[in-house]
Amino acid sequence: MAFRLELREKTPIWFNIVLPLSAVMATLLLCSGLVALAGANVFHAYSELFLSAVSSRFNLVETFVKAAPLIFTGLAVAVAFRAKFWNIGAEGQLLAGAMAAAYIGGIESLPSFSLVPLMIIASALAGAGWAMLPAILRTRFKVDDVVTTLLLNFVMFYVMTALLDGPWKDPLSGYPDSPDIRMDAEFPILLHATRLHLGVLLSLLAAPMVWWFIRRTTLGFSISVVGENPSASAYAGISITRILIYTALISGSLAGLAGAGEVGGLHFQVMSGISPGYGYTGIVIAMLARLNPIGVVLAALFFAVVVTGAEAMSRATGVPVYLADVIQGTALVTMLIAQLFTTYRIRTLTTQG
Amino acid sequence: MEEIISQIFQVGFFAAIIRIATPFVFATIGELFAERSGVLNLGIEGIMMFGAMTGFSTAYFTSSLWLGILAAMLTGMLMAALMGFLTVSLGLSQHVSGIGITMLSTGFAFFFYRLIFGQPSTLPNIKAFTPVGIPVLKDIPWIGPVLFEQTTLTYLAFAVVPLAAFLLYKTPWGLNLRTVGENPHAADSAGVSVSAMRYQGLIISGALMGIAGAFLVMVQFNAFTFGVISGRGWICIALVVFGQWGPWKSAAGALLFAMIDALQLRLQASSIIDLPYQVFLMMPFVLTIVTMMLVSRNARAPSALLIPFRKEER
Amino acid sequence: MSNPDYLLSMQGICKSFGAIQANNNVDLNLSEGDILGLLGENGAGKTTLMNILFGTYQADEGKIMIQGRQITIHSTADALGFGIGMVHQHFHLVHRHTVLENLLVGEPGRMGRLDFSGARRRLLEIGEQFGLTLNPDARVSELTIGEQQRLEIIKALFGDSKILILDEPTAVLTPNESTGLFEALRALAEGGLGIIFISHKLHEVRNVTNRVLVMRAGSVSALVEDTKEVTESDLARLMCGHELNPPKKNTSKLGDTFLSLSAIKTGGSTPQKLKGINLSVQGGEILGIAGVSGNGQKELADVIAGVLSHTEGTIEVKGEIISKASPRLMQKLKIGRIPEDRMTTGLVTSLPLYVSMVLPWIRRSIFSRFGILRKNEILSFTSKMIKRFTIQATGPEVKTGTLSGGNLQKVLLARELAFEPEVLLASQPTRGLDVAAAEFVHRQFLSLREKGAAIILISEDLEELFALSDRIVVMYEGRIAGETKINDASVEDIGLLMAGATFGA
């Protein structure tokens, strides 16, 4: 008996569900070894990891709150990766967006009603601007976008800490936190006695919009085509440079919006730990979602559960909280492998006689 | 101005350049082996981190720094082999696989460190490598203390460069590796196994990256912190481009880069220039991007870099 | 059954890929000094058979014997070890390496080091023995195509091959270079090698081989023990199962000049590929462009398509000078293009068929409005095209890459003909297609010509050019080396021009 990989004619729709699910299952199975190594009961640890997130109405809402920035960064990466613009820089773009929102939200002279919309616009612009840089570097100077987006994350992080240590330092406490934004700049809360803020709603609305954009607009069409075959696109009259720049702008603004939600809806200030790696988690989310915007929402919810549940699990069982990081890395790798089944099918060949 | 210059350009400064360059040389030469075989190893950042962690832990418990180095090497080789499985055996995207390896390795490093050491109030530390002066040579004025009063690892790093050049350009193995990176079909039709060569290139890269990470916790610092690598791996990717995929030029790039880093450290400490220290911290990253901008247009990467090889493809 | 006199004997070879039987019970024998022609159309199973011999695939059934001894070949390394060398159609050379380095790939070293001096000596020996010489220190990128092929042959000899396989070796050569190759092959055969010469060019097979094995649809359809006893048309019948009948060409009326180029040059930072091209084409004619590949045909096509900008000269479309050509502008001016490499520059193989079908037209108002796609129109258009061009595809949503080569070419044709181009630029439109698919393409071109469009046909296949063109120009080193009306043209003249001879020479 022999095996052979064959190209698939079509990818069945149910693959969008089954593949990520199997990748997640495989991930949890693989990581259970680590849990056992840490001396904890696997079932106990996993139930702590997942159940605390859904154990109460409040926690359930909190999961959505945690998912909001992940949805945005996941969408940012999904759009970028479709064009094969390797934006690993959602982290830095998020920080840029957060700072822009905090800056606008603190301007005393602006009329109250304009604050929230201006913060949203400013954060999108800041993220887009920061994402433009690697796109220009790639299209004009042929610099690898993976490397530049990664390096720019560090640059933006130091820009932020310089601000927090300098002009934005809290004069009272002396902590490296930015001053709070104005009360009027805080995002409205949508559900009483929770932290469900406007940013969460925006993230949930953004996903179908991005889906529609990719499927139903000429720009979305061009983004996919440029990603899959740049030279055929060029021959067909689609400018690769222009499409990559547009992709960067859209991707960056989505990542920037993640920052707006965190500042306007949650922390009301910028501090150095404002993003515990949301930009990087966005990569895993986008891959797990097979770059499908609707899938991004589900994958982001999953990782919101993992990231927050890890704390509870760690407290209850002593398993290091960094299990969440291992789960992210493992999920990315297993999903990559699972992706193979979308392009190929395995045929078993039996030889007669 | 003169004061600044005299304050900076002292013997200690040049010795620091050599020391700072060491991990960059190891990791850059490592990346070079992977890329010459046709695989961009973006796992570098995480592999360095994981190597630093296993190296540190092994040294901590065995009190043997060299066992620590060995552990770091093995860790790097293991993760690089996994990278090989994804990109060579399965032919998956090198970009995304590399990011995956980095995330996974970093996760492992943090997880195991916390598992082993818990959350202690003071950082566990080890007795770091101490400089070993080379008799006679170390007494040469000026040059001696700069070049010949370094740790053994630094001497090894600078031995790795000619060794890499010899292996790549003078041995059948090196020719086969370079051929696989340029035109895998040519290698295949000459009976050279493309995947074996790529695995070998990657595993060597992993070993050297592991050592680079271990150096940071065993010489530069004497403890493991989560920020120990902080972008050094990514910079090595750029150094390979800067060095046009040649060992000598890449090592020169590492030295140049180390000089910038040493300079920013001095400036930061000297308080001659009144700027937030973060400006100095970001300087290496900004300069790396600027350098990439200048050299990438004419860069001549291995022709088969990033392209998976499938034998039956016609 | 087995004859120890044979250098190589393959018996009862079977190989299938999925449902496709690529080789069915194939026998092949080769003696020392033999030049065996392996003749067949694309897809007849020649390449599969040779890949089995060279260790790229394993046969499902059958045995392989060398000098009467049964062997199994698991890998390329095994094949090389048994003295089998192969010169691939696409050269397997590293352009940045020198000649010596290319020869040393896969060779064991001497005391752990590359044996440059040994290789230099061996290269000289081969040069003396067979008259194949090359500068050992030249980089491959500096060699001509003919020299690169010589290097491939030397590479095989370097590994002490007794059996040499050449896969369509003349596809990239000028007629002169081909003659040189044939002489070298005869010398090698006299030296005791067994040579397998794969081709579908009948006259070459007649010229150089002493025996011919003809394959059709995976099986041996004939074995000719003495090439001299058969004619080219005999071979054609054996190969196709019927005589070749070129499509009939009606006379058509010449219309206005649609496109004219004068003194077009390219260059700037890139090496200059076009060095002053003057060309014009009228409605109702097919202009054939002959030439060995790499003489600027690709660049010419790119300039006309607006992908590559010219640095000097002017392009006129229907009398108007185009100052800044772009792919989109050229599409607007009704210049269609069938690119040379359909998989990489024409279609998007990983996406659904409808994407490839509407790719250049996506901005047309029938397919999108205000930047929003009209999915239903796109799908129904694709379905319509599938029917009209009898494309074998299950529907518009099928992944493009799963279609066969002939069907992919039909997709490109359908797409470019859909909006009635006035100029159609086709590069190697039938390369790799079987006879039926090629005939389909040719019929489409002729009917387009009758409708009054101008067609520029870039091809390396002289048979095709002579069958379709009204006029033929020859490109050599970025210039038009000569032009002739089809009625005055002879293969010999065109061949001379392709090799760089100037008019009147």
Image (cartoon, grey):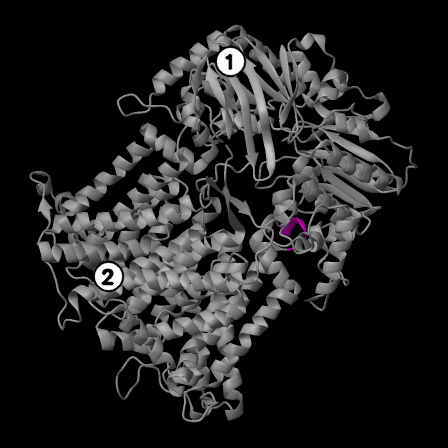
Q: Position of residue B254 (x, y in %)?
A: 30, 48
Q: Is residue B43 left or right of residue C89?
A: left
Total numbered badges shown on the rendered structure: 2
Say which chain tag 2 marks.
B
Q: Is residue A143 left or right of residue C180?
A: left
Mark 2 secondary-structure assignment: helix
Q: Disc 2 vs disc 1: which is toward the camera?
A: 1
User: Which residue is denoted by mark 2 in the rendering?
Assistant: B265
Pick whichever, B205 or C101, lies toward us.
B205
Q: Which residues are magenta?
A: A232-238
Pick whichever, B49 or C392, lies toward us.
C392
Mark 1 secondary-structure assignment: loop
Give the quarter of the image for residue C178: top right
Quarter the N terminus of chain B occupies: bottom left
Q: Is residue C248 magenta?
A: no
Give the quarter of the image for residue A177: bottom left
Give the distance between the C-alpha atoms of the residues marked 2 and 1, in whole angstroms: 62 Å
Residue at (51% x, 19% y) in the render:
C153
Q: Amino acid at mark 1?
A: Leu
The extreme left residue here reads B135
Residue at (57% x, 9% y) in the render:
C186
> Cβ–Cβ below 8 Å for labels 2 and 1?
no
Say which chain tag 1 marks.
C
**For residue C132, which numbered disc appears in the image?**
1
Q: Position of residue C88 (x, y in %)?
A: 54, 26
Q: Amino acid at mark 2?
A: Leu
Residue A10 in sight in this render: yes
Residue at (70% x, 50% y) in the render:
C327
Graded by Cα atoms within 10 Å as few (under 14), some (14 to 19) or many (20 or more), the crowding at tag 2 reads some
**For residue C295, which numbered disc appears in the image?**
none
